[in-house]
Image (cartoon, rainbow, N blue to C red):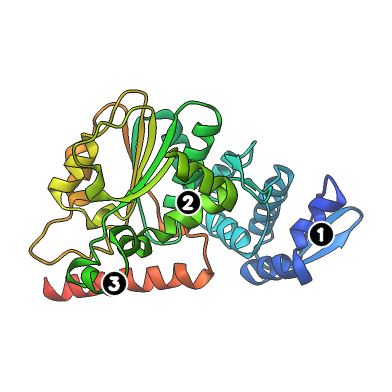
Amino acid sequence: MSEKFLAADSPEQLSALFGQLDGNISRIQKDFNVTVVSRDGGVKIIGDGDTEGAEKALRAIMNIAKNGSSVNEQTVRYVTSMVADGVEEQLQELGGDGICVTASGKILRPRTVGQKRYTDAIRNNTIVLGIGPAGTGKTYLAVAMAVKAFREHKIKKIILTRPAVEAGEKLGFLPGDMQDKVDPYLRPLYDALFDMFGAESFARYMEKGIIEVAPLAYMRGRTLDEAFIILDEAQNTTSEQIKMFLTRLGSESRMVITGDITQIDLPDTKRSGLVEAIKVLKGIDDIEIHRFSEKDVVRHRLVQDIIKAYEKYSEGRKNNHG
């Protein structure tokens, strides 16, 4: 039986490590088949299991807590998966000052390496395509980066758009005027802005035209200067639509295009504009294509398991058809 000891920098760091009702430590003990106990201002790892892996995971979690990030079940699950893959050194990229402060006073930080690299890509490029499964924070982080740019006076306007492809013929059956009809499809964008600005500031900026949330069709014929423009659910655009959107880019503006190419709702006869754009824009300077993996999912752990299950199912179907 081997033993290892890790000293904590503070009681708060130790508390974050153990988590509510020792939930974080329970996960570590289960994943690495060890016992972890609090001793002398730190933790002792005891057992015949993977004590070295447990030490790496605990050290990484303590560093994340030290850098100011919250530690929860998702954090522990992510760290243990990175240790299992032997890439735990990448976790050193996490931490720092954060992206921005939400209306509730929370400092928003990337929670995975994939998220950190995504926000770095947005910071360093004029156009970024964020491709990945649901729950990876593609849209939310893009909105946060837009809010950061606005607060730093780098842009004067935030424009969020998405195709209302699900509407189709059903759009006419929805009550209200055109804006009322498309609002349900834009709700996730509103929710992110509410978090960042708060309801009062959001309403004021909407009234002044500083924030614009509109369906993709409203972008046609415009040149968007000094704006941060986000196209969400881009997998449901046609080739013509995404080309139209990309050519709206004006001076001192930035664009982020997000989508999940495994959730295309277009009719079978139409090709996804996002799938085509990934191929067309590859290798162009100042445009980056960032791909998330299931490891970057920050929702409930079952979301990650569901994504993996569907990927396995789709791969099986392809092999059978082959």
Which residue, given by chain and number where applicable, does mark 1 sit on? Answer: 44
Going 75% across and 58% down the picture, which residue do you hit? 17
Residue 163 visible in the picture: yes
Which residue, given by chain and number where applicable, does mark 2 sit on? Answer: 140
- Give the label, 3 or 2, closer to the camera: 3
Disc 1 to disc 2, how far (Cα)?
A: 38 Å
Q: Tell me the amino acid under the disc marked 2.
A: Tyr
SS at mark 2 in the image: helix
Disc 3 to disc 2, how far (Cα)?
A: 27 Å
Residue 117 has which mark? none
* 321 sits to left or right of 234: left
Q: Are marks 1 and 2 in contact (CB under 8 Å)?
A: no
Q: Position of residue 15 (x, y in %)?
A: 81, 58
SS at mark 1 in the image: strand
Front residue (pair 269, 94): 269
Q: Position of residue 227 (x, y in %)?
A: 38, 32
- Give the label, 1 or 3, closer to the camera: 3
Quadrant of the image for the C terminus? Answer: bottom left
Earlier sequence position, callout 1 versus callout 2: 1
Earlier sequence position, callout 1 versus callout 3: 1
Q: Tell me the amino acid under the disc marked 3.
A: Leu
Front residue (pair 226, 74): 226
Q: Quadrant of residue 107?
A: top right
On screen, residue 239 above or below 254? below
Quadrant of the image for the N terminus? Answer: bottom right
Most distant residue in the right direction: 40
Q: Position of residue 73 (x, y in %)?
A: 63, 65
Which residue, given by chain and number where applicable, does mark 3 sit on? Answer: 174
SS at mark 3 in the image: loop
Earlier sequence position, callout 3 versus callout 2: 2
